[in-house]
Image: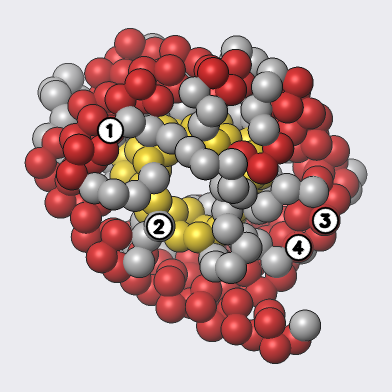
Amino acid sequence: MTRTTILPPERVTIVGVLNATPDSFSDGGRFLRRGEAPDVEFAVREARAMIEAGAHWIDVGGESTRPGAEEVPALEEIRRTRPVIEALAKHLDVPLSIDTRKAEVAAAALGAGATIVNDVSGLAFDPALAQEVARHEAGLVLGHLRGEPADMQEGVQFEDVLTEVASELRSAVQAAEAAGVASERIAIDPGIGFGKELRHNLVLLARAGELRERVGRPVMVGPSRKSFLARITGDEVPATRDTASQAACAVAVFAGADAVRVHEVAGARRAVQIARALREARA
């Protein structure tokens, strides 16, 4: 990866979600059934379709981090994701990221062709992950998460969610830089749906630009198909939440977000194009 910012300022970056899991909340099992090897040809087709729809990079995950999810052993996570990343790197000419909390999984993915690590725990789960990112001169997205996916929705408490999330993400950025990750290769993610209640998610989306200013790094948001949207719209089935997801992404981009991580790319691309145009008109 060249020494340029991980999220170029001249665009809103669209990150397409590709879950190599049997149990992710929205799309688990699409090309990997429990105990089976991933269908890499299907994964390549899915990724290519997202790129044709406007995705700038593809984020591959092998461990569900939905509320209540149990930890997946690193070797199983590697078994799910490394063949997919190898195939995508061979057939596609876009950046690939690995969605993982584990240094061992990150190392395998970066060796297979990924150039970015998306750590939802913000280095809290495995601080050694930052050293692997630095060693490969890769990009790093630091997410905000208190606790573990298995228990993160229990006892959620914030006095001032924006201030607290900004402070904890600043600490994560400092830890990454101390491990040797270049500042321009770091982005942050407020962790929408990760240990937050509805009101917390709404504040973080509506004030994404303030989070960017407080931490000093570009912001990626990932509200796509998450359950907090159903609290507002009543759409209980995740796949029916794309319109709500697009609205949430558009608001976040209008507020200052630099990237969105989504399951359905084409509609999100249009939504954030309008949001960016409006943001520029406001400026």
Gap between marks 2 and 3 measured at Cα: 24 Å
Compare marks 4 and 1 and give the one earlier in the sequence.
1
Decide which of 147, 253 is in the foreground and name it: 253
Decide which of 227, 125 is in the foreground and name it: 125
Residue at x-position 59% and y-position 41%? 3
Disc ID at residue 209: 4
* Residue count near mark 3 (Cα–Cα under 10 Å), binned few <14, some 14–19, many ≥20: few
Decide which of 16, 234 is in the foreground and name it: 16
Amino acid on which disc 4 is placed: Gly
Percent x, y for residue 181? 65, 28
Q: Which residue is mark 1?
A: 85
Say whether residue 30 is left or right of residue 118: left
Residue at x-position 25% and y-position 65%? 52
Q: Which residue is mark 2?
A: 56
Compare marks 3 and 1 and give the one earlier in the sequence.
1
Depicted 2 relative to depicted 249: above or below: above
Compare marks 2 and 3 and give the one earlier in the sequence.
2
Percent x, y for residue 122? 65, 30
Compare marks 4 and 2 and give the one earlier in the sequence.
2
Say whether residue 65 is left or right of residue 27: right
Q: Nearer the viewer, mark 4 or mark 2?
A: 2
Q: Which element type, helix, strand or loop, lies under badge 1?
A: helix
Disc ID at residue 213: 3
Percent x, y for residue 88? 23, 40
